[in-house]
Image (cartoon, helix red, strand yellow):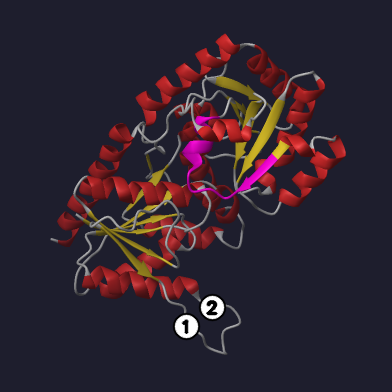
Amino acid sequence: MNIGITVYPTYGGSGIVGSELGQELAERGHNVHFISSIMPMRLNANHERIHFHEVEMMSYPLFEHQPYDLALATKMATVARAENLDLLHVHYAIPHSISAVLARESIKQKRYVPVITTLHGTDITLVGADRSYLPITRYGLQQSDGVTAVSKFLKQATIETFDFDEITVIPNFICPTHYQRLADSPLRKELAPNGERLLTHVSNFRAVKRPIDCVEILAKVRSAGENARLVLVGDGPEMSAVRYRAEQLGVTDSVLHVGKQSNIADYLGVSDIFLLPSELESFGLAALEAQACEVPVIATRIGGIPEVINDGESGFLSDIGDVEKMSSDTLKLVRNEDMRRSFGERGRELAVQRYSTNEIIPQYIAFYEKILGKAKANNA
């Protein structure tokens, strides 16, 4: 198949999943064309079956803001015709599904290119639910030839918000050979030179991720007499508040800010405990990646997280903002090496059984074939 994929090329779950999906499809013999403003992170552009098409923005004095959605639609239509794309697979409803539908309609006299929209979370739970965006988001879903969601929670949220239920759940995934425990990595000695226990948090550091809670947890663990450090991977608007809180609690020297990293697996592979105190997660990709690296997860019992983490088996779940319980659970794992190892092994087992690429990528391919078959029948 010739597949067009559009993602937000930023440090976030949808961009990561879309990029890695494209790479997995290329490894299986499909030609993948990424259509985006910049090269997505984690994308191996040197693969012979992966192609990148940059969306170029028009500079015109009339526009206060450049119309990216129209530029994207134009590029999608151009690439679809030039490369004989079989379908357009867009990740995130706004504005990608609207741009893809517009591109499909603009060239359908020549050939019909089905549009598949994958919902990742905030495109539905935050952006799409805004009254000003709700009608156009619903239209994008209704006009897509196929819609998938990354969790059962997100499917139900979409049904309740948009009264639209033609959704197939295909969860996020991990490559078991890429995400592994790295016990003897030099990075471990660099991050924990004195044998500290490493608590790790990976996110885009928006308020919804509650990264300050991670600092609170670290402070309580250290005040209980345990030698631990907090490794923060990523960057975002809450980072200055995180630094300030660490200074207030006197743990600045125990907080490591490593910034945005393309090699997330390296940091997870040497971690002891993963912290995800978010107030909303439609899936919890970072938690899945941590489990694949045999790292127990401390997280909130919200959204799609309970679908990923087995409470009391591969991690501990708490209510939003319950820093006391999350700190207590973290201390249990810090002080009990056997429990930490057992949780890690169980998390790895669950991650591989449920969410490995060998389980999930064939589901996407089967969905593509179903939508292509349906489109061919309708056009006939």
Q: Which residues are magenta?
A: 256-270
Relative to 95, residue 286 above or below: above
Relative to 51, residue 364 above or below: above
**Three-letter code for the amino acid on which mark 1 is drawn:** Met
Relative to 111, residue 353 above or below: above
Q: Nearer the viewer, residue 291 or 254?
A: 254
Give the spatial CA distance, label 1 vs label 2. Answer: 7 Å
Please rate how many residues cluster around mark 2, counting C-alpha atoms within 10 Å: few if below 14, some from 14 to 19, many from 20. some
Q: Is residue 266 magenta?
A: yes
Q: Quadrant of the C terminus?
A: bottom left
Residue at the image point whose x is 77% and y is 32% from the top? 216
Q: Do tag 1 and tag 2 residues touch (Cβ < 8 Å)? A: yes
Q: Is residue 27 magenta?
A: no
Residue at the image point whose x is 48% and y is 48% from the top? 262
> Pointer 1: what residue?
58
> Pointer 2: what residue?
66
